[in-house]
Image (cartoon, coloured by chain):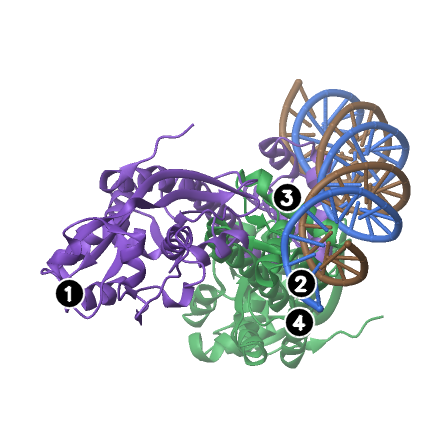
Chain colours: A green, B purple, C brown, D blue
Amino acid sequence: MLSVHQLTCFLATYEQGSLTRAAEELGYAQPSVSEQIRALEKSLGVQLFRRVGRGVVPTTVADTLRPYAERVLGAIDEAERAVQSVRSLETGTIRFGMFGTARLYAGAGLVADVLERYPGVRVELIGQNSTDVQEELRRGRLEAAMIAVAAAASEGMTITPVARDELVYISADPERVASPVTAARLSQASLVMPETTWRANDSTRIVLRQMLHETGRNPVTRIEVEDVETAVELVGRGLADSVVPRGVVDQLLPRLAPNAGWTSLRPRQHDILAIVHRADAILSPAAQLMIELATRRIQEITEPVHRR
Amino acid sequence: MLSVHQLTCFLATYEQGSLTRAAEELGYAQPSVSEQIRALEKSLGVQLFRRVGRGVVPTTVADTLRPYAERVLGAIDEAERAVQSVRSLETGTIRFGMFGTARLYAGAGLVADVLERYPGVRVELIGQNSTDVQEELRRGRLEAAMIAVAAAASEGMTITPVARDELVYISADPERVASPVTAARLSQASLVMPETTWRANDSTRIVLRQMLHETGRNPVTRIEVEDVETAVELVGRGLADSVVPRGVVDQLLPRLAPNAGWTSLRPRQHDILAIVHRADAILSPAAQLMIELATRRIQEITEPVHRR
DNA sequence: GCACGACATAGGCTCGACCTATGCTTTCTG
DNA sequence: CAGAAAGCATAGGTCGAGCCTATGTCGTGC
């Protein structure tokens, strides 16, 4: 097989018209270059230089090969520069996991932050729900993510809480949000809940289940929908009440359910938002950037958690 | 330095999503591919694959690198194919030496012959005079040539005579070409001779010098010009006579000096046309082709020399 | 004819490329 | 849930490629 090194020696020799000078240019001893050229000639089955007394003279085959050799070396150079520019976040793709709700009220701003600093990059925010984001992380398809973590911390993952988002009760009936909602009242409410597909693992639901479980009650939902928008809209129409993070309330209530109000649970409950990645992972600059920016964004909107 | 081999392993791994399968595809053991990938990652300073339980997953850097890696391998492939097609004379340049006079009456036909067989090639016929062609040969800048050789056979050159071209006396005066010209008459003639720059080494002049020397006379030229055409035209105008090869007479006399006639010298003198190349050279297919075609062309026009 | 320049050859060293064997971790399956 | 299977990493050993220095050979130029 034709090697890069051989082509480098070939070009140097072609340009210098001399093995000795080529060797000097490349920082090798003369026999080394000589050997490379001979190997190249052998592997191609043609003579590239005529050895003639003083110096060497390229054959027509060498004339033909030269532009191709240059292109190969150029392509290698480009490859290296491309990789380095990805390293320095000048280009390439930054992929970051973020479960639905968090993305909902920090996604656009986060993407804007990234693009402002690094106009050349592509940005992908991946994930429907914290559960499948965790699965992607586990499979190595995502490097890092910001998700809501329930008590269930999975094995082999490093979880860094960065904020907590209060879960609040929302309703179109002013009476029902006049005072904090206890577990007893919650268990009697007629609720619409989003994230049906992930109902078993959804962090909000896990928190609610724990809250009710402590008082010996089971959660009951009247309506199941997939996305929070629909749930909020249904609350606005007075068809059911719901429990959603404060971030969602700030973001969606004025738009989708302007007549609805909200109140805390009693005791207060929270979703914990955390940065998650494989415990053994060495984070890339891109991932570190996303973690930093996402953390800042989320902490502007929710209550920061300062730990350590 | 980034090596072709590393890129090959990288691409195979990327496509297979597995070091083991990549190794199978390439015919290596799994640790070998593993080592190459690691070396590539180290030399680039980035992680290309996340190792995750079953198989490996490309990082975004790997996504970026892939098209570049493919281009590098593609360029190498092209280089090899280009060289092979030159080998088989499908493309590339064929360079052949031929001194002025011979080129004058066989050049166009010879180029036509080559192009008919190999439409893709470039053809270069190099050389002003036999002397500088020999110099080019000696320096290795030409592989082979057809030239007129004087008695002076140079060292280290293989000379194969293929034809001889009679040197004839031409004049616009019918009387002077009524009978063969002897050395005595020649030494008194008023001559125009071409190839001024090469006068010391020009084969025709060497032949004439020897002819006259044997009779104790020295050659005298009235007019010196560079190219044969001018010389013949001057003869046509009756300003001088000349001695040129028969080939030139056939080619130029009707056109440039229609009123002129020619006669042999007595004794007859000849330019020897020969194939010349370095004694140690292994001739390329292109050179062999040119030798064969040039020989055939010349022998159609002049008197063949069969030797060996 | 002699010295110098330039490529080839010889011999030796080091390191990279490859292999087999084996260990560790994850994933699949009964 | 335990054992098998799959897949990557590690270890250790062999072989050859790449590189060096020293020296030979040949052409060139003074």
Residue B288 vertical position relative to residue B49 in the rendered view, above or below: above
Answer with the quarter of the image where residue B228 lies. bottom left
Foreground pick, A132 / A272? A132
Same subunit under labels 2 and 3?
Answer: yes
Query: Nearer the observer, disc 4 or disc 1?
Result: 1
Q: Identify residue for label 4.
A: A289
Q: Disc 1 or disc 3, which is closer to the eye?
A: 1
Q: Is residue B237 left or right of residue A85?
A: left
Residue highlighted by disc 2: A183
Q: Secondary structure at mark 2?
A: helix
Tell me the amino acid under the disc marked 3: Arg
The answer to whether the residues at label 4 and label 1 have Cβ atoms under 8 Å apart is no
Q: Position of residue A75 (x, y in %)?
A: 53, 59
Q: Secondary structure at mark 3?
A: helix
Q: Which residue is mark 1?
A: B236
**Kind of residue at disc 1:** Gly
SS state under label 1 = helix
Percent x, y of residue A114: 58, 75
